[in-house]
Image: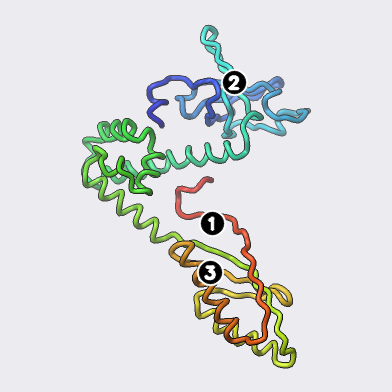
Amino acid sequence: MTEQKQQRNSPRPGELVIAQVSKIMQFGAYCKLLEYNGIEVFIPIREVSSGWIKNIHEFLHNGQKLVCKITYIDNQKGTIDASIKKVMPKEAKDKLGTYNLEKRFSILVGKMIKETGEEKNREKIDYDIVSEFGSYAQLYFDLSEGTKRFKESKMPKKLKDRLREFIDEQNAKKKHRVAYVLEMVVEDTENGVTMINEALKEAEKSGVEISYISSPKYHMVAEGADYKDSEEKVKSAVSTIGARLKNVELKVEKEKLRKDKEGIFDSD
């Protein structure tokens, strides 16, 4: 939970929040705000989707978690309205990612507090984290970047050292992957296939996986400690192929990859 949310008992107009559907009506749905101790908000049916809704149950179900935007607060009546359709897909993805990170990392830090013998100071540590970073999610980002704020944090040294060990372990597990499509045209048609196979076998020694797509295209994939390392492996492989095949035309085109999950802190 962020510093602002701890200081406030209710959300603000325009704020993105995580809601869980608790009651579905013909004209809308009531939801509990998970970041505000279950405060109830109402989502009118017109704010569920941009298109025409024949049956609201086709869009929502009880227990469903979703991202919505606070649109109206009536302090006198104590009611809050929210909208789903006013939330852009990227906003929803980012909000859910931060929410999940907040939960997971706060649990992990709690375990580390026990490991380092600081459990008796848990309340103060929680207070300092929220005061200094605003949230556990932001603590994770500062830790990952090794910021000055993290280095100067009031957290106990043992806990800070354990957090550094954790991020080092996470970084060691990460693999940065790149993929290319290689197109080859060899003039020596008589021995072309044999020459290509030998060149590809030699190129794979650079740490690149090469697979056949369809003539004359091949798929090249490399993993490394960082993207520069991965790219260098591909460059080395292409250079090897060019050196082994004298009369060859090479065309290399980068392929977009979906981001692989790298640990427990990626969005669900």
Frontmost of labels 1 and 3 is: 3
Q: How is the image coloured?
A: rainbow
The amino acid sitting under disc 3 is Ala
The 10 Å Cα crowd at callout 2, few under 14, some 14 to 19, many 20 or more, is some
Which one is in front, 79 or 134? 134
Please indicate whether residue 215 sits to the left or right of residue 63 in the image. right
Do tag 1 and tag 3 residues touch (Cβ < 8 Å)?
no
Give the CA distance from mark 1 to mark 3.
Answer: 14 Å
The amino acid sitting under disc 2 is Thr
Q: Which residue is mark 3?
A: 222
Image quarter of residue 219: bottom right
Mark sitting earlier along the chain (1/3): 3
Residue at disc 1, secondary structure: loop
Q: Which residue is mark 1?
A: 260
| In the rendered image, the vertical position of residue 70 relative to residue 112, given as above or below | above
Q: Residue at x 71, y 80 (%)?
A: 185
Q: Residue at x 40, y 31 (%)?
A: 2
Which one is in front, 147 or 154? 147
The 10 Å Cα crowd at callout 3, few under 14, some 14 to 19, many 20 or more, is many
Q: Identify the disc placed on residue 251.
A: none
